[in-house]
Each structure stands twice: as C-alpha cells, then as structure tokens.
Image: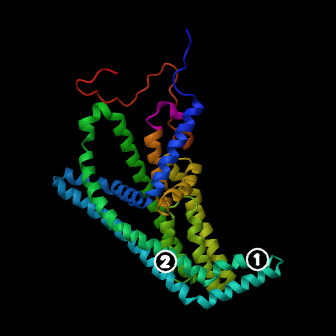
Amino acid sequence: MEHTPRGLAPSTRILLALAAAVVALAGLHAARGVFGPIALGAVIVIIVLPLRAPLVARGWPSWVANTAVIVAAYVILAILLAMLVYAGVQFGHLVSSYVDELRQTAQDITDRLTDLGLASSTADDAARWLDPSKLISIGTKISGTAVSVAGAFFFVLAYVIFMAADAARYSHARGVFGATRGAVIDRAEAFNDGVRRYFVVNATFGAIVAIVDGFALWLLGVPAPAVWAILAFVTNFIPNIGFVLGLVPPAVLALVVGGWPLALAVVAVYCVVNVVLQVLVQPKFVADTVNLSLTLSFASVVFWTFVIGPLGAILAIPLTLLVRTLVLEPDPGAGWLRWLSGDPAARDPGPGAVVERDPEPAPAEGAPPA
C-alpha cells in the first residue's frame, strides 16, 4: 500500500507563513492612518487601567472608576500633545532667529572641509544640513507631524472611551472563561503587564535624562534648553537610536551660537549622561522587563517605523510583544523562536511531554462530528 505523507513540507509552511505575513503587513501599511491611533489608544488604556481596580475595591461605582481611567488617559494624551506643539513652535522660532548664523556656520564648514582636501560635493553635502532652508523643512515636517498627531488625537479620544469601557467588561473574563480559556487569558494579562512595565521604565529613565540634559544645557548657555529636554524625553521612547535623534539638534545649535568648544561640550554631556543611561543601563532594564533581545528591540524600531510610520518607533516594543503573543506563544513548537526573541523561559516540549493547547470551540448543536 502506497504511503502518502501527511501535511506540508517545512519549506512550504515557511513560504506560506512569509506570504501571509507580507499580506498582513501590507494591509497594516495601507491602513496605518487608522491602525496607529488605535494602537496608541490601546497602549494608553493598558497603562492607566490599573487605576480602576482600587477604586472599585473601595466601593466606587463602576462608571465612576471607568471615568477616572478615561480622564487619566486624556491627561497623558494632552501632555504629549502639548509637548509636541511647544517643541515644534519653539524649534521654528529658533531657526528663524539664527538664520544668518546658520548660513555662516555652513559656509565655514564647507571651507574647512575643502581645505582638508575633501571633494567640494562632499563638503557641500555635509554643510547642507546646517542650511536654514534644510532646517526649516525639518521644522515643517515636525510641525506637520504635530498636526497629524493632533488630527489623530480626536480619534484617539473616542477610542479611549470605548476601550476603557470594554476593558472593564473584559476584567471578568477569567471568572467566565477561566476553565476553558485560561491559557489565552494568561497570555493577554502577561502582554498587558509587559507593555505597562516597559512604558513605566522608559518614562522613568526619560524623565531623568530630560532633567539632567536640560539642566546641563542651561548651564552651558545653549538656547531653549526646555525644548531639548522635551526632545530627550520623547526620543527616549525610541529604543537604541533615540539618543542620536535627541543629540543632533542641540549640538548643531551649540555649534552655531558657541562654536566647536560649546558643541563638543554638549556632545560630551550627552555621551556621559545619555550613553550611560540610555545605551548601557536602560536597555538592560527594558530587556529584562519585556524579555526581548537587544537586537530584536533595535530591529523592531526600523521595522515598525517602515510599516506604520513615525508612530511605529514609539510603539515598536508593544507591537513586537503583540506579535509574539499572538503568533509564537500559542504554538508549542515555537519555543526556540521565543527563546531567540529573548524569552528565557521558552522551551520546546520534550519527547512524551503533554502539550497544553488552547481548547477547540465546541461544535454547534446538531453538527456532525469532525
């Protein structure tokens, strides 16, 4: 009797999985204007949702506890929006105030690089970043980003209301479905806890870095230290490369107003403070908090920024955790992939081990058996 192999070949399964991933990610990229605000609203609700349980435990009505969660989410959104708008407006004023100095600094850099024997095209490319028109275009992009965030802000407000109300109902899921869907509920709770701890760690380190950087820039006499402190706080939520994004603008401004000594002093301060905290200390805390490898944390920033735009840089870690929760954790055979992603507790089931799978839904009444 001829033996017929069951199932697909491993290479075929891999190709099908990659094809499905490409289709799903293309859909996310096309719908990034909708998906981004929804993801942001969900993350904010996850962060503030623990405020509800103590209020209910003290006898507060459920609707009052839900309102408190919504108000806390709105406060976070309002603070973020106010910081973005303030930083964008002040950046535009700074560029307008130092137009002549920027042009002169750009010309000086071009002349210096030409004297060192570099090609004129290379010198022009290096100095073009100090050209006022270039910086104004950057400021315009920042303002445009702030406007787009402000536009999405109203959608996020509505999302937060609905998500907070639904989250209150979902809190009873374990009591209703704990016996049949306990593994799914455990993964959802672990995901929420990981996202919440990740942003708490980042916000803590971001506040420390912002305060130290802002105070140091104020002592050095760099204009608008509050703007650069806000920039340091916001870019702290971008893993690994946030340090560079937060350093370049104040260093360029220091070069314009104080020359190379002041610019080098700013770079030295950032290297001491930001490199120690953001590059050496914080990634270790983040990796331990969410159980993601440093390499995956860095790659996720580039990947999710490409998929859903600038908001993906801030939501990179939560989205990566969501993919692992939905795709890898339910699969008992994906233990080695989870281990590669940074989960130290991941293991493949040994021979003869009993694998706990999510229960299949019960067939409809009257349906023939499978």
Residue extending farthest to the bottom is 100
Query: Is residue 323 on the magenta stretch?
Result: no
- Which mark, by number, is residue 349? none
* Residue 253 visible in the snapshot: no
- Label 2, secondary structure: give it: helix
- Residue at 72% across, 86% down: 108
Q: Can I make out residue 297 in this image?
A: yes
In the displayed structure, 92 sits above or below 276; it is: below
Asked whether, in this view, residue 162 is left or right of residue 15, the answer is left
- Residue at 27% across / 61% down in the picture? 70
Is 26 placed left or right of 42 in the picture?
A: right
- Position of residue 47 measured from the top left corner of the image (x, y, whole percent): 36, 56
Q: Point out residue 297 in the picture as x, y percentages from the top left corner.
A: 55, 52
Q: Residue 146 or 90: which is nearer the viewer?
A: 146
Which of the two marks, 1 or 2, is nearer to us in this view? 1
The vertical placement of 256 against 334, above or below, is: below
Q: Amino acid at mark 1?
A: Ser
Q: Is 242 displayed left or right of 164 in the figure?
A: right
* Quadrant assignment for the C terminus: top left
Callout 1: SS? helix
x 59%, y 83%: residue: 133
Task: Look at mark 2 in the image and give the residue it sits on.
Answer: 227
Label disc, if present, on residue 121 of the rendered structure: 1
Please identify the quadrant where the N terminus is shown.
Answer: top right
Q: CA distance from mark 1 to mark 2?
A: 33 Å
- Residue range highlighted in magenta: 328-336
The residue closer to the viewer here, 257 or 217, is: 257
Q: Measuring from the top left, give residue 294's x and y in whole percent.
A: 57, 50
